[in-house]
Image (cartoon, rainbow, N blue to C red):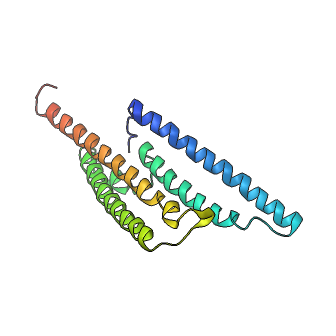
Amino acid sequence: MTKPKRSSLAQKGARFEELVLCLLLGFMIVLACVQIALRTFFGGGLLWADPLLRYLVLWSGLLGASMATSRGEHIALDLAGYLLPEKLQPLVQLACHLFALITSGFLTWASILFIQSEIEYGSPGLLDIPTWGWNMIFPLAFLLITLRYLALVFTTTTTILQGHKSTTGVRQ
């Protein structure tokens, strides 16, 4: 699968996303090392550190999935790419992007419903941040993934239509 081209705004967004992921990872490593040192040398650690690390792993995993989608490096089953003729591959790619777009759209909607439920019935969370605040990564990440697949659907459709025009003798 070819990697999508990115606009200037998308490149800035990707850099910001990389920065956030690097900061999250660095903070997680430092906090985990502090926890290990405190447990090893003082017999105990920070009560809030382990739950915070779990939330940060969740955030970094979902932001990483979004970034992988933007780079075209997400997990994909590419068996069809090897078995089908080259002319059909863009159509299969479009079908895969459409399926992923619909799936991520439903996940975005479900995560919004989840957050609404957390706001209505949720409990206080870690560090006095409500649980819905920690879980906001779900709609955020799935929305980013949905928008990225939407862009891939448009890009792939444009490529297919331009290829069709060039094969039918229409000038581009």
Q: Quadrant of the C terminus?
A: top left
Residue 111 placed where, x, y %? 39, 64
Above or below, 106 against 69 in this view is below
Residue 32 placed where, x, y %? 73, 58
The reply, left or right, for residue 145 in relation to residue 21 is: left
Pick out the residue farthest to the right: 41
Which picture quadrant has residue 53? bottom right
At 45% from the left and 52% from the top, the residue drawn is 74
Q: Is residue 15 visible?
A: yes
Pick out the residue farthest to the top: 171
At 82% from the left and 69% from the top, the residue drawn is 44
The reply, left or right, for residue 98 in relation to residue 115 is: left
At 43% from the left and 54% from the top, the residue drawn is 140
At 34% from the left and 48% from the top, the residue drawn is 147
Residue 120 placed where, x, y %? 41, 71
Which picture quadrant has residue 3? top left
Q: Is residue 76 visible?
A: no
Residue 141 placed where, x, y %? 44, 54
The reply, left or right, for residue 168 in relation to residue 131 is: left
Pick out the residue farthest to the bottom: 121
Q: How many marks?
A: 0
Q: Quadrant of the N terminus?
A: top left
The reply, left or right, for residue 6 in relation to residue 49 is: left
Nearer the observer, 129 or 58: 129
